[in-house]
Image (cartoon, helix red, strand yellow):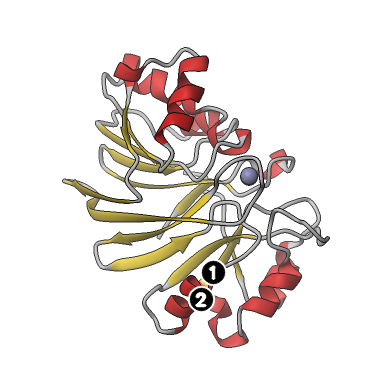
């Protein structure tokens, strides 16, 4: 359902910053916008001719918002379009954008925890944010997306999967989970180790879980051997 521009963790730049999108004709929904994202969007011609741009942000770490400024500038000056940003903490993102010279008239912001979009090309979209456990310093969110009858969960960066989400996966309300997964495994980890993921997800539901935000310490084979999927980088 989602295509990925990058699938790596912050330091795993080989796999590029984790970011996903849904595109149909001149409408583009982008999830996160880390430092490597704008370059890849340009390279893949994903922003050419876009008339409706929506950007969902999970949190404000650089590997998730590092090139947000460029994307907004490009949209405002080249595409002559104000993108809509979805993020529950309005002041946080506004403050960041002011500090990098992006003024308020260049974008729109929707900070409702539950937001609806009705886009001519993408269809009916409902985004429901939920706080996730990641770091102490900034808030981080996962969200459920309902798009044209399909429902999935995107974890953002998180070291856990909530009971609510697990329940919804088990009863079929959510059909796919995209989950931050890493190889490193230690007390106080801000990401979810594959070992923990195996503890949390029973074997019969693992084919509905797609691992993303991979660090250098995890092998795709290892993920697949445990019954999970690995997201693939979109190459156009
Ligand atoms: Zn990250
Ligand atoms: Zn993070």
Count of numbered circles in the view: 2
Instruction: Give me the residue at 76% from left, 56% from top.
Output: 189
* SS at mark 1 in the image: loop
- Find out if the beta carbon at label 2 lies less than 8 Å from the nearest ligand 2 atom: no
Q: Which residue is mark 2?
A: 166
Q: Is residue 20 left or right of residue 151?
A: right
- Measure how far apart labels 1 and 2 are at the Cα level: 6 Å
Q: Which residue is mark 1?
A: 162
Q: Residue furthest left?
A: 120
Instruction: Give me the residue at 26% from left, 42% from top.
Output: 25
96 w.r.t. 209: above or below: above
The label nearer to you, 1 versus 2, is 1
Instruction: Report the front residue among 124 and 110.
Output: 110
Instruction: Give me the residue at 50% from left, 29% from top.
Output: 38
Instruction: Report the front residue among 77 and 184.
Output: 184
Image marks 1 and 2: residues in contact by CB distance under 8 Å:
yes
């Amino acid at each position: 359902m989602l295509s990925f521009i990058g699938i790596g963790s912050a330091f795993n730049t080989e796999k590029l910053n984790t970011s996903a999108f849904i595109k149909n004709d001149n409408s583009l929904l982008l999830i996160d916008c880390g430092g490597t994202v704008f370059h890849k969007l340009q390279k893949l011609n994903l922003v050419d001719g876009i008339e409706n741009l929506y950007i969902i942000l999970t949190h404000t770490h650089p590997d998730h918002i590092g090139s947000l400024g460029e994307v907004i500038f490009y949209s405002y000056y080249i595409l002559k379009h104000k993108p809509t940003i979805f993020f529950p903490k309005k002041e946080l993102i506004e403050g960041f954008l002011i500090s990098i010279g992006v003024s308020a008239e260049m974008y729109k912001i929707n900070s409702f925890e539950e937001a609806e979009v009705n886009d001519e090309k993408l269809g009916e979209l409902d985004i429901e944010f939920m706080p996730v456990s990641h770091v102490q310093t900034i808030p981080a969110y996962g969200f459920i997306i309902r798009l044209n009858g399909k429902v999935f969960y995107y974890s953002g960066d998180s070291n856990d999967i909530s009971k609510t989400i697990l329940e919804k996966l088990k009863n079929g309300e959510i059909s796919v989970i995209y989950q931050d997964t890493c190889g490193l495994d230690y007390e106080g980890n801000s990401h979810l180790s594959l070992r923990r993921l195996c503890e949390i997800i029973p074997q019969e539901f693992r084919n509905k879980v797609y691992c993303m935000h991979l660090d250098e310490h995890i092998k795709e084979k290892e993920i697949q051997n445990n019954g999970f999927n690995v997201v693939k980088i979109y190459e156009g």
